Image (tube, grey):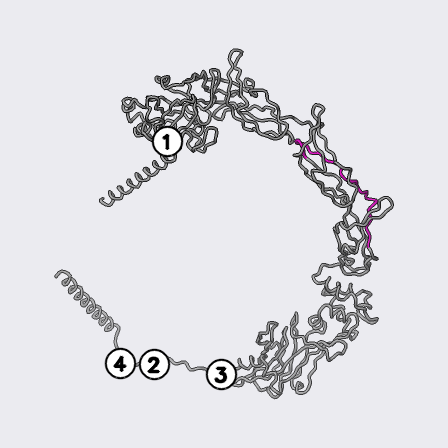
Amino acid sequence: MKNSSLKMKRVVGMILAFLMVFNLVVFTGQVGAFADGNTPGESSSNDVGQSNQNTSGESTSDGSIKVNILTSFTEITSVGEISGKTEIAMIPQKYGTNDVILGLPDGSALVRPIALASDTKTLNSIPETEVKNLVAPYNTASKSDITNAVGEYCCIDYNNKDSVFVVQPSKGGKGFDHCPYGTIKYNANNAWYYNCCRGGVHGAGPFYIYTYTTKQIEYSSDNVEVKFKEDFTPLMSAGTVDPSLLEAVINLDSDTTYTVPSIELSDNYVNPETGDVTITAKVGVDGSYIEKEITAAVKIEESSIYTRLNSGIYTGVQAKTFSKNEFEVGFILDGKSYTASDFELVDATVDPSKGDTQITIKYAGYTKQIDAATKLEESAVFARLKSGKYTGVQAKTFSKDDIEVGFNLDGKSYTASDFELVDATVNPINGDTKITIKYAGYTKEISAATAITGDVKANGTTGVKELINKVSTITPKTNSVINNNSISTVEAAINIMEPTKLDKYVNEAINLGDANVAVKQDGTAAKLQAKVNTVDASVITNSLTPEEIIRVLAGEKVDLRLEVVVDETSDAKDTTGGQLIESNLNTNESAYYFTADLYKIFNDDEENKSSITEFSDAISFTIDIPEEIRNEGRLFTLVASHELADGTFETFELVDTDDDDTTFTASTTKLCTMALVYADEAVAETPIVEDPVIEPAYNYDVSPETADLRNILWAFIITVSAGAVLVVTFRKEFQ
């Protein structure tokens, strides 16, 4: 309870501290007759007057508005005239008897007279309960504010208090000071000045103080006329209109007319050269307004506008950009011409070579186009290749240097360089033989390549275009697959992308003797006979590139030779791959090393044969296990170690897929150093050492009943011991 009380006191203390700081911030933020320190007429973020007007308004269902107005103003020019007044108006402008205020002007206020600053008796007699901040009710006020108002620092004339009146602002116009009290004095320059009670405002003014009457009136747009107070000459150029030049006249009936000398303009800008010639006035208060448009600038009719080039029309064909100095724009009014300078060049460029011959300007709200260049006719434009048509079959991209474009004018030809290559590529394989250019606003097609006839079609297979580029210059032999099928190398390149046609052509090449697959075994390799199981066509398609296949189909000869070399000199064993195999052998294992490579040899050129170590699809081969390493019951494993492209090695085992103990058949996509690994004896296993079983020195036959009795006895002893320990412990605790 004590802690709860303390916590409550702390919370209350924090709340009181926050309120004290907040009150201090609000107090120090109040600045003068204008809460933000602005002079009359400036805007303020502390828009108290906007919602604290003495006047008010409301809209009616028929479109008219009702407002409470201030009128019948009588000026007060001495403190003696203030005494006895309930509320007076303190306004920065001069008002007459028939003038009307629809809303308190910015920086003005209605104030309640309290007493002369010298009348301490009256001031001291004001009860604390009646001290309030009327102009800003959310701010606090106290008797000290009244004391401050007449004090040496805040009183507007501390040494002449008989000429100073203490006032309490009750309603404030936009931006008026938020202090609850202040003092006013009429000075020698025939105006009033104001100080606030908290020192933020000193000598604000000049003000004019009036008595007034209030009444409610209702008016509509038909009753309101907004006009210039004196003769006004409409503006001929862009500018703003001062709202003080206008006034609103409200005609309620033939006998009742009110003048509103201070109105607000929601739009005070005009620019006759953009078509904006009106300003907008708002007559009303509190969001209920009658809006009226007033013409304040000369209206320029479209028919009166003229636009012309200072010089003649442009007769060139290249692009040209005009400047404003090359045009004369203006209007004619009452028979007189007026030139303009603030027209806008929306589009200042012509390009006869592209068919663009007009420029565009914008003036007085109107858009006008001017013919500024001569137009080139399509029939005069020519486009052709500088050399003959392209007769190749591969795709070709032309450059502008390959094309001649221009026009004929008055019997003379002119070439151009600023034409656009819209489509510069031909691809005879696809039937695309034309290129497209654009010039002078016209699109022209040029036949630039010879079309390819026959069955050739682009099948969209990846790589076919690159292949065609490589093989299109190959000339097939008379007795070749390509000639026998009456196709071109380009057609063959496209056709081999289809697996069925590829197999057909490769088998035909094998039958012609242009493609062959064989096994070569030299020297001691005879101990390890080998054969390729995969059909020759598959080996060929897996081993040759598409370009090499086309060469074979064109009549070149290729031999694919599987070469097996048995390791007699430990060369294979001593390689990196061989050492990796050796390092993985168990102590009782032996290895029979050999290398297997597939070579491709074109046109019997043994010196330039190339090795193939990897295939796209697996190739099956069978080797005979040499008799010297055969033994009854002996099992063989084939281990390979292959060097990868990044220089690292991959060691792997191949599975024997046949049932013959004298052969080993495997499939692989990699040929490399290999070894037949075998062992005659099993690897000695590490003995398992078990924990010894310790037999007891005696062997009593303990019955279940005896065992139960012993368990009960041991439980009793443990319980008694635990109880003794607890007793000792409690005794020590209480001694």
Q: Position of residue 520 (x, y in %)?
A: 70, 82
Please tell me whether mark 1 or mark 2 is closer to you in this view.
1
Q: Which residue is mark 3?
A: 683
Quarter assignment of residue 54: top left
Amino acid beneath label 4? Asn
Quarter assignment of residue 398: bottom right
Amino acid beneath label 3? Val
**Depth check, front residue: 695 or 216:** 216
Label 2 residue SS = loop
- Left or right: where 97 falls relative to 677: left
Q: Which mark is residue 517?
A: none
Q: Is residue 6 above or below residue 266?
A: below
Residue under the image location 69 percent in, 36 percent down: 361
Q: Which mark is residue 699?
A: 4
Q: Is residue 527 above or below residue 501?
A: below
Q: Is residue 598 above or below residue 420?
A: below
Label 1 residue SS = loop
Amino acid beneath label 1? Tyr
Q: Position of residue 356 (x, y in %)?
A: 75, 42
Which of the two discs, 1 and 2, labels the residue nearer the N terminus? Answer: 1
Q: Which residue is mark 2?
A: 692
Q: Magenta residues?
A: 362-385
Please tell me whether mark 4 or mark 1 is closer to you in this view.
1
Please tell me whether mark 3 or mark 1 is closer to you in this view.
1
Residue under the image location 59 percent in, 20 percent down: 231
Q: Is residue 365 magenta?
A: yes
Label 4 residue SS = loop
Mark 4 Cα-neighbour bin, 10 Å: few <14, some 14–19, many ≥20: few
Mark 2 Cα-neighbour bin, 10 Å: few <14, some 14–19, many ≥20: few
Q: Is residue 521 above or below residue 293?
A: below
Which of the two discs, 4 and 1, labels the residue nearer the N terminus? Answer: 1
Disc 2 to disc 3, how far (Cα)?
Answer: 27 Å
